Image (spheres, rainbow, N blue to C red):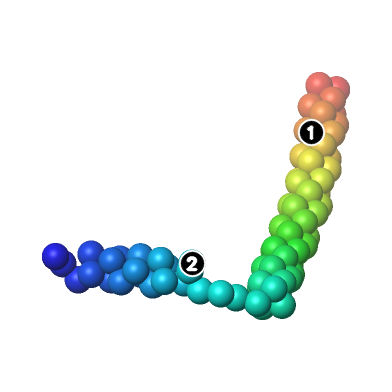
Amino acid sequence: MNKYQKVINQIAKDDLKASFRKVSFKVVRQEIRAFAKELNYNLKELIEHKNYCKGINQLIFTHKKQIIESNRLLDSLERR
């Protein structure tokens, strides 16, 4: 058995022991709240990132439209 298999086996044994431990409802509730808080934080972070990207995309789109308009003006001036 290599060292990784030993570590994995130990983790599995610890998990088996942990699943049969009695835990108070208060402890479970605290862990669930902590997990929900972390999820909510991650969700807020993702929403902020999405909104930031949306703003950047809008800037790029606006800039692209300005470039297209500038090219049209240059083309029309060159034709004269």
**Circle 1 Cα neighbour tier, 10 Å, few/some/many (<14 / 14–19 / ≥20):** few
Q: Mark 2 or mark 1: which is in front?
A: 2
Going from the N terminus, do you reach mark 2 or mark 1 first?
A: 2
Residue at point 34% right, 69% down? 13
Q: Could you tell me residue 26's position as x and y percent?
A: 71, 77
**Is the residue 36 above or below the residue 65 in the image?**
below
Q: CA distance from mark 2 to mark 1?
A: 64 Å
**Regarding mark 1 in the picture, which secondary structure is present there?**
helix
Horizontally, residue 18 falls left or right of residue 2, namely: right
Horizontally, residue 74 falls left or right of residue 46, namely right
Mark 2 = which residue?
19
Q: Which numbered disc covers residue 68?
A: 1
Residue 8 x, y percent position in the rendering: 30, 66
In percent of the image, x 79 and y 27: which residue is there? 75
Instruction: Quadrant for residue 14, please give it.
Output: bottom left
Asked if residue 78 shows in the view, the reply is no
Amino acid bearing label 1: Ile
